[in-house]
């Protein structure tokens, strides 16, 4: 099991990034909450990782904090929640916001996330409620850093692609991005605002 990676950030195109660790390039999928905290390209970053092994692929997921990884690992144990949906949940809500939804039985707050229907939201609240104290015991590691917008294509185009990868329909993703005044904003900033608008 790969517990963490520390290396140079080579490329980022949400939800995927490429990390150079001593000459070996690791492809990692990460939630948008982690992307918001990434340093600029060429700078060093440490990610807590979780490896998912399937018959057709080995997929490495990376997280800015141990808290995010813990929540991801707990989410994928819930019936009907796979790694992709868990990544979408972490992209659409912070760990604290997810705790609040579970604690307040806020089904509507979870249903606003792409891929989360009424039954899945109810199942999440029931199955996660008993596990939250364990998750709360892990302190969040908030890394202050500046996000870089050095990506192929325009920030708007990259934002639409990232939202589609997170489960939004192309027309919905385009509408969400179009509603934002994106001048001089990075891809990460556009996605952040689009996701915030989607869950209001």
Image (cartoon, rainbow, N blue to C red):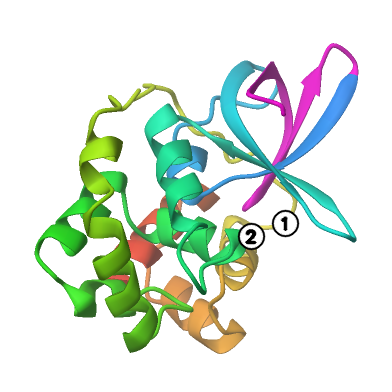
Q: Residue at x 36, y 21 (%)?
A: 144
Q: Nearer the viewer, residue 55 or 196?
A: 55
What predominant SS class does the magenta segment belong to? Answer: strand
Q: Is residue 65 above or below residue 13?
A: above
Task: Identify the residue under disc 1.
Answer: 153
Give percent across and percent down for residue 20. 80, 22
Q: Is residue 188 above or below residue 69?
A: below
Tell me, yes or no, if residue 94 can be seen here.
yes
Hey, which quadrant is residue 65 in on the image? top left
Residue 113 is inside the magenta segment: no
Q: Are marks 2 and 1 in contact (CB under 8 Å)?
A: yes
Hey, which quadrant is residue 117 in on the image? bottom left
Q: Residue at x 20, y 61 (%)?
A: 102
Relative to 104, 196 lies left or right: right
Task: Identify the residue under disc 2.
Answer: 158
Give percent across and percent down for residue 165. 64, 67
Q: Residue at x 39, y 66 (%)?
A: 194
* Residue range highlighted in magenta: 1-23
Badge 1 crowding class, 10 Å Cα cut-off, few under 14, some 14 to 19, many 20 or more, is: few
Give percent across and percent down for residue 34. 48, 39
């Amino acid at each position: 099991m790969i517990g963490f990676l520390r290396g140079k950030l080579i490329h980022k195109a949400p939800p995927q990034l490429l990390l150079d660790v001593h000459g070996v390039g690791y492809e990692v999928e990460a939630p948008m909450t982690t992307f918001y905290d990434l340093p600029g390209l060429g700078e060093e970053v440490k990610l807590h990782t979780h490896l998912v092994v399937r018959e057709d692929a080995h997929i490495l997921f990376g997280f800015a904090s141990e808290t995010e990884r813990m929540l991801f690992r707990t989410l994928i144990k819930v019936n009907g929640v796979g790694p992709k949906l868990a990544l979408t949940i972490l992209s659409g809500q912070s760990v604290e916001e997810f705790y609040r939804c579970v604690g307040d039985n806020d089904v509507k707050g979870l249903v606003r996330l792409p891929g989360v229907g009424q039954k899945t939201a109810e199942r999440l609240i029931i199955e996660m409620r008993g596990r939250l104290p364990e998750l709360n015991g892990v302190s969040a590691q908030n890394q202050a850093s500046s996000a870089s917008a050095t990506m192929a294509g325009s920030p708007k185009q990259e934002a639409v692609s990232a939202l589609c990868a997170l489960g939004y329909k192309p027309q919905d993703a385009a509408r969400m991005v179009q509603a934002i005044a994106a001048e001089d904003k990075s891809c990460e900033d556009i996605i952040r605002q689009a996701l915030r608008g989607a869950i209001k």
